[in-house]
Image (cartoon, helix red, strand yellow):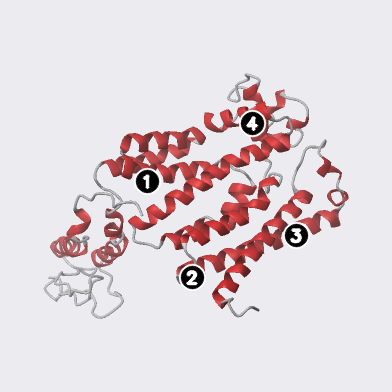
Amino acid sequence: MPATTTPRAVSSLTTLRLGVVGSVLVLLGGLVISAVPHSSWVADLAWRHSMPGRMSGLVVVVGGLGLLSAAWVRLWRAAGHGHADLHAVRRATVLFVLPLLVAPPLFSRDGWSYAAQGELTRLGLSPYTWGPGVLSGPVVEAVDPRWLATPTPYGPLPLLWGSGTARLVDSPWAMVVGHRLLALVGLALLAWALPRLAAWTRHDPAFVSALVLPSPLVLAHGVGGLHNDLLMVGLGAAALVVAAERGWVLGAATGGLAAAVKLPGGLVCLGVVLLSLHAGPACASAWAGWPRWGWSAWRCWSGSASWPGPGAAGCTRSGSPAPCTHRWPSARPSSCCCPAPGCSPRSWQWGSWCCWRWARPPATARRRCAPPPSP
């Protein structure tokens, strides 16, 4: 080993090798176990026509996913300890993705349905009226029989993209690769939006990006399976950032694009509305304490005598609430009264008001917040 090579550099190189080898194994195994058109050269592979061959292909895919998972864990742990920056995370994601670009649709036949729906759109047949079964030839050979007569549930954006791809190429495999580029757009949008969302909540952008971008679920399901969900999620995340930094009009338009991929993507417009009501990203960190405060309030209100920590709730013999000596999450002693079961109704009312008074978030969480400058 050269003297200039540090242990940290060796660890980073090992992580990249694990991820790339894992992706290559998923590609090779996917050629054996994935559905492909009968007219494709892959369909003639001998391993696809025997049980030992298919089981071997499955073992290769599972092994590749294991290596991808190991690389992912190593990467986000390195980012969490400050040994990998945002650039390193994005570079690793790109390297992990490259072998999957030419793979057949993995773990699902939906990619072939996308290609057939794009061909329907190109021919002027509405995919909302007709299913892929009205077509013939290689473009429908690998479509799942359950979806041959089913109209598309997706929005117009992937259909228009598929139509454009079908105008450029004739091969169903090339159409699938073209549709996978749309999934990469969603991944790129996530890579752009996540650091900003992380900065609003005062989390490390590199660590948050490492948790999401090179995740085996994102790579295998979103890119390998080329599902439209990845584009929908990317547009949804981008809508929040655009609404905070460029205004609610552009944010709502971006949310509309998410709905144009899959209808549930339009729900992100609720977040756009909240941002437009001056409850911006800077409030996220202040409101992050709500679960902790709410839990304390609920436990106090419920009057459980088995409250963990110093002190316990209870009532005096006269039925009035006894002072609670529990130290609240704010590390200040509470003077509220915590009623226990059996207390009078007035004690419950008084205790509930006290718990709300002391358990609510600090005043900074209720101020009007403006979005912070983008990192």
Comparing labels 3 and 4, the label whose residue is closer to the camera: 4
Q: Please, what is the three-letter code of the amino acid marked with disc 4?
A: Thr
Q: Tell me how far mark 3 sits from mark 4, CA to CA.
A: 31 Å
Mark 1, secondary structure of its residue? helix
Query: Horizontal and vertical percent for residue 338?
Result: 19, 69
- Local crowd at mark 1 within 10 Å, few (<14), some, or many (≥20)? many
Whichever of labels 3 and 4 marks the residue nearer the N terminus, that label is: 3
Between marks 1 and 3 in the image, the one whose residue lies nearer the viewer = 1
Amino acid at dot 2? His
Chain-order first, disc 3 or disc 2: 3
Q: CA distance from mark 3 to mark 2?
A: 31 Å
Q: Does residue 7 appear in this view?
A: yes
Mark 3 vs mark 2, foreground winner is 2
* Residue receiving disc 3: 60
Specify the label residue 241 is tagged with: 1
Tell me residue 28's x, y (percent): 75, 54
What percent of the width, then of the height, locates residue 287?
28, 57
- Marking on residue 181: none
Residue at 82 percent across and 37 percent down: it is 38
Q: What is the C-alpha distance between the residues marked 4 and 2? A: 41 Å
Residue 314 against residue 45 in the figure, above or below: below
Give the labeled residue for mark 4: 165
216 sits left or right of 211 in the view: right
Q: 350 above or below 112?
A: below
Q: CA distance from mark 4 to mark 1?
A: 30 Å
The kind of residue on which mark 1 rests is Val
Please tell me which residue is depicted at 48% across the width and 32% down the height of the picture: 260
Residue position marked by numbered label 2 in the rendering: 83
